[in-house]
Image (cartoon, rainbow, N blue to C red):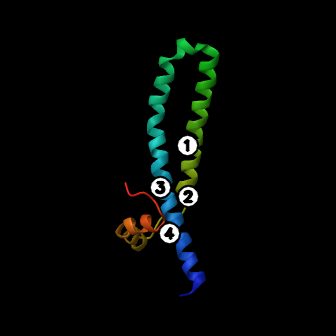
Amino acid sequence: LDPESFFRDFLRLQALRMREESLAGLDEAREEMPAQRAGLEQVREQIGEEQYARALASLESAVAMVEETRALMEKLPVPSPAEAELLARNEARIRETLGEDLE
C-alpha cells in the first residue's frame, strides 16, 4: 500500500463527497428562503419597520451567501463515471467508516 497514493485517493473522494453534500444542503437552504421571507412578512407589523429592514437585509445576505457558496462548489471537480459508481455502490460503507449517521 502506497501511503501517498492512498491519501491522494482518499482526499479526492472526500472532496467529491463534500461537493455533492454541500450542493444538496445549499439547494435545501435555497428552497427554504421564500418561506423564511414569508414568515418575516407575517411579523412585519409586530416587529416594526426598523427591525424588519434589518431582518430582511440579513435574509438577503444569507441568500447571496448561499448563491456564492453554490457557485464555488460547482467549480469543484465532479466524479468520473467510475468514481460516481464506486461512491454510490459503497455509500453506506463510506458513511459508516467516517462515523456518519445513516439516514
Q: Nearer the viewer, mark 1 or mark 4?
A: 4
Return the x and y of residue 40 as percentages of the image width and height. Answer: 51, 22
Question: Label 2 belongs to which residue?
Answer: 75
Along the line of sight, the residue nearer the viewer: 97 or 91: 97
User: In terms of secondary structure, where does tag 1 sit?
Assistant: helix
Cβ atoms under marks 2 and 3 closer than 8 Å: no
Q: Residues within 10 Å of mark 3 (few under 14, many from 20)?
A: few
Cβ atoms under marks 3 and 4 closer than 8 Å: no
Along the line of sight, the residue nearer the viewer: 56 or 90: 90
Query: What residue sits 58% from the left and 53% below the top?
Result: 72
Return the x and y of residue 82 as percentages of the image width and height. Answer: 40, 74
* Label 3 or label 4, whichever comes before in sequence order: 4
* Label 1 or label 4, whichever comes before in sequence order: 4
Query: What residue sits 57% from the left and 31% below the top?
Result: 59
Amino acid of disc 4? Leu
Question: Label 3 belongs to which residue?
Answer: 21
User: In terms of secondary structure, where does tag 3 sit?
Assistant: helix
Question: Label 1 belongs to which residue?
Answer: 66
* Label 2 or label 3, whichever comes before in sequence order: 3
User: In terms of secondary structure, where does tag 2 sit?
Assistant: helix
Question: Label 4 belongs to which residue?
Answer: 13
Amino acid of disc 2? Lys
How far is the residue under mark 2 from the one under mark 1? Answer: 14 Å
Amino acid of disc 3? Glu
Q: Nearer the viewer, mark 2 or mark 4?
A: 4
Query: What residue sits 47% from the left and 48% below the top?
Result: 25
Amino acid of disc 1? Val
Cβ atoms under marks 2 and 4 closer than 8 Å: no
